[in-house]
Amino acid sequence: MADFESAFQRTLKAEGGFRLTNINGDRGGQTYAGIARNMHRRWPGWAWIDRDETPPTDLVRDFYRSEFWTPLQCSRMTQETAEDIYDFAVNAGPRVSAKLAQAVAGVVPDGVIGPKTIEALERIDPATFRPLFALAKIARYRDIVTRDRTQGRFLLGWINRTLGALQ
């Protein structure tokens, strides 16, 4: 049902494209194409980065597919729902994204997308799911900043990314 490539392109754009960044205060640390070194130390692309070379595009694409798209079973969802769940997983982690999606879908939030979650998501019109999921994401971001004020500098970007996905 859902197509990985269009979801990948959308998320890559939200992550700033094929760029290397190191933003002060970002818990992910050094990031390339949205892949945070502190969270994904074993990604083979870091060897390229460390040699001042550009990792192959397929290495980035394969990472996103294997770490986020496939474990969340996004190909079994509508395009809109898959893109939202996938993109939030890239930003917050697959288990967090799955739990929020499950809560919105009305199933036990265990952090693993399985047959019950897929069935529940199929019963929800994406036009209903998407804004509810966006509100849940914004509430989570609010909670992060409430717990750790240093993360407040990222709040507007997180909200803009969430709202931009609804367009």
Image (spheres, rainbow, N blue to C red):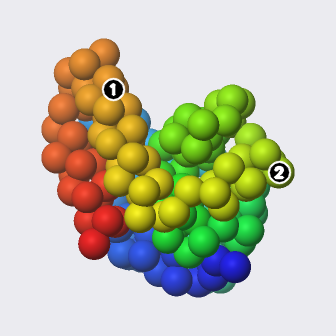
Question: Which residue was labeled with disc 2?
Answer: 115
Q: Nearer the viewer, residue 24 or 6?
A: 6
The amino acid at mark 1 is: Ile
Q: SS for tag 1?
A: helix
The quarter in which the C terminus is drawn is bottom left
Q: Earlier in the sequence, mark 2 or mark 1?
A: 2
Q: Nearer the viewer, residue 140 or 102?
A: 102
| Residue at horizontal 47 percent and vertical 54 percent from the top | 129
Q: Is residue 61 above or below residue 132?
A: below
Q: Nearer the viewer, residue 91 or 128?
A: 128
Residue 19, given in percent of the width and then of the height, sits at 37, 71
Question: Which residue was labeled with disc 1?
Answer: 144
Instruction: Answer with left or right where residue 79 lies relative to residue 52.
Output: right
The quarter in which the N terminus is drawn is bottom right
Residue 150, given in percent of the width and then of the height, sits at 22, 26
* Mark number displayed over residue 124: none
Q: Does residue 60 appear in the picture of this structure? A: no
